[in-house]
Amino acid sequence: MTSANPFGAIFLFLRFLQKDWGPWSPWGRIMQKQRHMDEAIYDLIRDRRTHFDSDRVDILNLLLSTRDENGEGLSDTELRDELVTLLFAGYETTATALAWALYWIHQCPDVRQKLLAELDGLGENPDPMEIFRLPYLAAVAQESLRIGSPAMLTFPRVVERPVELGGQTLEPGTVVLGCVYLTHQRQDLYPEPHLFKPKRFLERQFSPYEFIPFGGGSRRCIGLALANYEMKLVLATILSRWELEIAEQDPVVPQRRGVLLAPKGGIALWHVLSIKPHGIPCTPDVGHGNFGLILKLAF
């Protein structure tokens, strides 16, 4: 709700701007949308509680079935918070990561050819887990998250007792944030950091403090496994079904979009060939035949 333009996130950090003066004020519009969203989520929670189906397998059912050490389940408010976190943290971030990945794959023909060769080696109708375990596909996904990490910063930590970090003494109360973008651009960790080189992830295992697209520590993104799985399957499906080309040759640069970094102006790809005779039917069908001359990934 706050990432529709580069200035939207300012309301998240400047509390004095968070004034609800009705739907005509910027914060008022945000609050109105949030109320509408909350109504829909709480209606869904009430309906699921009333008509609970233990055989149904989805995130909400899993959360409804969760119990703490005292046998207590999550309250409606806690359920709402978990669902909103998954919805917003797992939607725009993954879409942005996929846009960057498709850009770099088609910007680097050798990378695309290696990926297609690896996918073709699975034959027709491969199991999704076979795709997930492909080493070069994993390296491409990791390098995409490194060079175009949607998240700029980790969640803030507050110092509880004096500690020395990087030669600096931090006093209690100091707010500390890790910068994902700058970490992934370090020359000592990633030689030639501005180049897209998936092989770096085949040649070296980076530590959880060197490769941090999902943050780190106990506050690491809960959606890490799902995002990696989704990203690999979507890329495999698109690459196996369509042949695309970069439509605009001007370099694409990152631009702050709310709290994220996204391709400025989106990514434009030409659809140059129809669907191949066989694709990877491991994800919901995304269309048949010619879906247009340009696929615009504007996240």
Image (cartoon, rainbow, N blue to C red):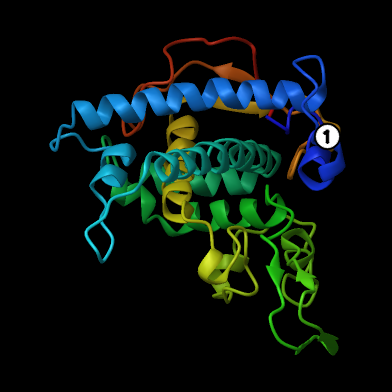
In front here: 100 or 251?
Answer: 100
In the picture, the quarter occupied by the N terminus is: top right
Q: Which residue is mark 1?
A: 6
Q: Is residue 27 left or right of residue 67?
A: right
Q: Where residue 221 sits in the image (x, y, percent)?
A: 53, 57
Q: Amino acid at mark 1?
A: Pro
Q: Is residue 170 left or right of residue 219?
A: right
Number of callouts in the render?
1
Q: Where residue 197 sits in the image (x, y, percent)?
A: 67, 59
Residue at position x 75%, y 89% in the image? 162
Q: Where residue 220 sits in the image (x, y, percent)?
A: 54, 63
Dot 1, how many residues are within 10 Å of its Cα: few (below 14), some (14-19), or many (20+)?
some
In the picture, the quarter occupied by the C terminus is: top right
In front here: 110 or 40?
Answer: 40
Q: Is residue 15 left or right of residue 234?
A: right
Residue at position x 72%, y 33% in the image? 2
In front here: 109 or 102?
Answer: 102
Q: Where residue 107 sits in the image (x, y, percent)?
A: 71, 40
Q: Can residue 127 be seen here? A: no
Residue 203 placement: quadrant = bottom right
Q: Can residue 124 be seen here? A: yes
Q: Identify the secondary structure beneath mark 1.
A: loop
Residue at position x 84%, y 90% in the image? 167
Residue at position x 81%, y 24% in the image? 26
Residue 257 placement: quadrant = top right
In front here: 174 or 58?
Answer: 174
Q: Is residue 46 above or below residue 99?
A: above
